[in-house]
Amino acid sequence: MTENKEIGTTEIDDKKKPSHIVYLVKNRDDKAVFQKVGALWPHKDGKGFSQSLEFFDWDIRLLIRENK
């Protein structure tokens, strides 16, 4: 768990199924091809998400919070 007065509690339960899946959309021969590249989990305080992205040999974790 990460706690900061500016962003609040960003705790997530990584063992739970993600609430959203992230796709990279490529156009190939005038058709959209969807490639799964990550997942999104809501924070326990309901004010943001943690996002995991895996593509191009990168393993990236993003923190998304509501704008105050």
Image (tube, rainbow, N blue to C red):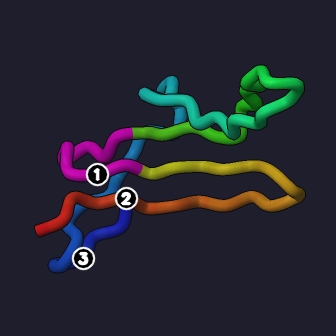
Q: Mark 1 points at which residue?
A: 48
Residue furthest to the left in view is 68
Which residue: 66% across, 50% down? 53
Answer above or below: position of 55 versus 26: below
**Which badge, 2 or 3, comes first in the chain's sequence?**
3
Report the mark closest to the observer, 2 or 3: 2
| Residue 14 locus on image (x, y percent) | 51, 39
In the image, taking residue 68 as reference, residue 66 lies left or right, namely right
Callout 1, which amino acid? Gly
Callout 3, which amino acid? Asn
* Quarter of the rendering occupied by the N terminus: bottom left
| Residue 11 locus on image (x, y percent) | 34, 53
Which residue: 43% across, 39% down? 41
Q: Are marks 1 and 2 in contact (CB under 8 Å)?
A: yes
* Quarter of the rendering occupied by the C terminus: bottom left
Answer above or below: position of 1 versus 19: below
Q: Is 44 within the magenta?
A: yes
| Residue 64 locus on image (x, y percent) | 37, 58
Answer above or below: position of 30 versus 27: above
